[in-house]
Amino acid sequence: MRDFQITIDGVEIHTFSFEGGTVGQTLTLEGSVDFDPFLLDGEHFVHIGPLDEVCSGGGGFRWETGGRFVFSG
């Protein structure tokens, strides 16, 4: 199981887990998250990061280029 969190400006808004794949496998993550509204003036930092530095079983992970965040209110 891989555990990650999504933060906006350092504030955790969601955590998620998914089962790992096999060597060379690409997994696509998709979903939605609801959180309390906040003012989107200026620049903000959105981060998806691992909660564990080392994957179980001696594996690893790598984020591929792409993806998107859509904010709606």
Image (tube, rainbow, N blue to C red):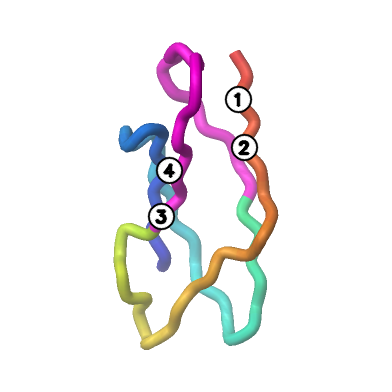
Taking depth in this image into account, of 10 and 37 the one nearest to the observer is 10
Taking depth in this image into account, of 66 and 31 the one nearest to the observer is 66
As measured in the structure, the alpha-carbon distance from the residue carrying label 4 to the one carrying label 2 is: 11 Å
Q: Earlier in the sequence, mark 4 or mark 2?
A: 4
Considering every residue shown, the one lying at the far front of the view is: 42
Label 3 is placed on what type of residue?
Answer: Gly
As measured in the structure, the alpha-carbon distance from the residue carrying label 1 to the one carrying label 4 is: 14 Å
* Residue tagged 3: 49
Q: Is residue 2 above or below residue 32?
A: below
Mark 1, residues whose alpha carbon is within 10 Å: few (<14), some, or many (≥20)? few
Image point (39%, 39%), residue name: 7
Image point (58%, 86%), residue name: 23
Label 2 is placed on what type of residue?
Answer: Phe
Q: Is residue 63 left or right of residue 7?
A: right
Q: Earlier in the sequence, mark 3 or mark 1?
A: 3
* Residue tagged 2: 69
Contact between marks 3 and 4 (CB within 8 A): the answer is no
* Residue tagged 1: 71
The range drawn in magenta is 30-49
**Residue 70 screen position, x and y as percent:** 64, 31
Contact between marks 1 and 2 (CB within 8 A): the answer is yes
Considering every residue shown, the one lying at the far right of the view is: 66
